[in-house]
Image (tube, rainbow, N blue to C red):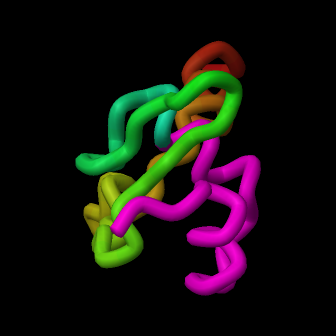
């Protein structure tokens, strides 16, 4: 059954704006825009698509070190 994105956010304890951004980016499989509202299947499983390498590289810090050398 389709529910509004607002209701989905409430049920899954997520921020509505974050889910709206995921919907616009196409990262939610069952979302569709109906008029001005986003509708999503209530059984949609949220996935975290962020890259997790285990090692953070701060490119700004590395670049400043190269300039100073």
| Image height of 56 relative to 25, above or below | below
* Image position, residue 52 (x, y; %): 31, 63
> Is most of the magenta stretch helix, strand or loop?
helix
Residue at the top extreme? 67
Q: Nearer the viewer, residue 8 or 27?
A: 8
Q: Residue at (38%, 54%) from the top-left corner?
A: 50
| In-image side of 14 versus 31 (left or right) | right
| Image height of 41 relative to 38, above or below | below
| Image height of 37 relative to 67, above or below | below
The C terminus lies in quadrant: top right
Residue segment shown in magenta: 1-22
Q: Residue at (65%, 37%) from the top-left corner?
A: 37
Q: Residue at (71%, 61%) from the top-left corner?
A: 6
The N terminus lies in quadrant: bottom left
* Image position, residue 2 (x, y; %): 41, 60
* Image position, residue 21 (x, y; %): 60, 37
Q: Nearer the viewer, residue 27 or 54?
A: 27
Q: Nearer the viewer, residue 58 or 30?
A: 30
Q: Nearer the viewer, residue 50 or 43?
A: 43
How many numbered discs sit on the rendered protein? 0
Q: Residue at (35%, 63%) from the top-left corner?
A: 41
Q: Is residue 12 magenta?
A: yes
* Image position, residue 45 (x, y; %): 29, 73
Q: Is residue 49 magenta?
A: no
């Amino acid at each position: 059954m389709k529910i509004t994105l607002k209701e989905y956010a409430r049920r899954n304890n997520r921020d509505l704006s974050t889910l709206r951004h995921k919907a616009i980016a196409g990262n939610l499989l069952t979302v569709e825009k109906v008029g001005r509202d986003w509708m999503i299947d209530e059984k949609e499983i949220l996935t975290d698509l962020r890259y997790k390498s285990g090692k953070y590289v701060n490119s700004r810090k590395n670049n400043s070190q190269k300039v100073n050398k």
